[in-house]
Amino acid sequence: MAKQKNESRKLWQKSSERSKGRIGVVGATGYTGMELIRLLTDHPDISLDIVTSRSNAGTRFSKLYPSFEGIFEDELQPMEALKDADLDLIFLALPHRVSMDFVQEYGLNNFRIIDLSGDFRLKSKDLYEKWYNKKHVCPEFIEKAAYGLPELNRDRIRNADLVANPGCYPTSSILALAPLLDGSLIDPKSIVIDSKSGVTGAGSTPKETTHFPNVFGNFFAYGLRNHRHTPEIEQILSIKTGQEVTVQFTPHLLPIDRGILTTAYSTPVVDLNLELVRDTFLNYYEKEYFVRVVDQPPSVKNVRGSNFCDVFATYDERTNRIITISAIDNLVKGAAGQAIQNMNLMFRFIEKTGLEYAPLNP
């Protein structure tokens, strides 16, 4: 442990002496990898030194994604090129069950890692293996990983060598519920979460459910009772609030390319009114740049392409229910943008550096 802390200190000193942090993106050709590159190319304090792809090594990135023509022309490298690279931090934009193989092979002594998969989000090896149906090959790294939701875990992220970037559904759900649970205002076993996502949340590999004729003009639920983001939501909210949280989580697929709209229902355990609910959220997120407490139910177009999470909360006296609605871009605050927010914390940059994009609407 002392050796690893010493290595982390050396890495930080090495990074501080440079004019820019040296960054790599592993698995650069998926949607989250592409979004990372879109955001990183405008980041003033980093140098994007290497991007890798197993299936497209040797190909110019802009040939695969013509929107990057004249913006990012680097050639995709094989994974093995990382062994000769002098890097401060790597983003792993790899599938679930693959990232842990990378961490097992490379460790944390040569560079810090932000993992965008689910391989290190759950704090129990048994829980991971139950929900992901895969043996965890390096459980010794699970406790080392900081959960990368800055609004709840900023201090741990700053000093971490391995950050588990949250899932997109959990980001929208946790930010919608944390103020209520942290203030002990609701029954932690009363929560129902109804989330809808655009198809990019399923990744870039074609699937029957994301095939255009199936998605266009359609809308459906999936993963009822067993979606792998359920234990992630429950775990983080339980840790944050010190009480056992149980949620009924149901995801849906929207016929749009990007965005998540989450509606959460909860039952209060104290006397409430609309003003108190509203003030709870305003006070909780008062200093959070990327969480905007809004005056009307949010829409995905109002956060599209940005790292913002818009949150609206109201109270229905008739049903004695609090209704909270959040909206994020699943590829930005739900993935790549949040990963860069975490990188900024780890490098002691200003947290919003490289992320001050206004949403794209329309």
Image (cartoon, rainbow, N blue to C red):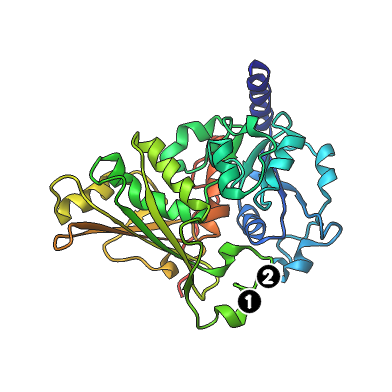
Categorize mark 1 by other alpha carbons within 10 Å: few (<14), some (14-19), many (20+).
few
Q: Position of residue 215 (x, y in %)?
A: 55, 78
Q: Tell me the element at label 1.
A: loop
Image quarter of residue 301: bottom left
x 42%, y 45%: residue? 234
Q: Tell me the element at label 2.
A: loop
Q: Position of residue 230 (x, y in %)?
A: 46, 51
Furthest residue in direction top, as rendered: 2
Please state which of residues 170 and 130 is positioned toward the viewer in this rendering. 130
Disc sitting over residue 160 in the figure: none
Is 145 drawn above or below residue 281 in the view shown? above
* Upstream in sequence: badge 1 or badge 2: 2
Categorize mark 2 by other alpha carbons within 10 Å: few (<14), some (14-19), many (20+).
few
| Callout 1 touching callout 2 (CB < 8 Å) | yes
What residue did someone put label 2 on?
206
Q: What amino acid type should be assigned to the residue bearing mark 1?
A: His
Q: Where is residue 91 in the image (x, y as percent from the top left)?
A: 66, 46
Tell whether 12 sits left or right of 49.
left
What residue did someone put label 1 on?
211
Please state which of residues 135 and 265 is positioned toward the viewer in this rendering. 135
Please state which of residues 288 and 95 is positioned toward the viewer in this rendering. 95
Q: What amino acid type should be assigned to the residue bearing mark 2?
A: Pro
x 69%, y 31%: residue? 108
Is 47 drawn above or below residue 273 in the view shown? above
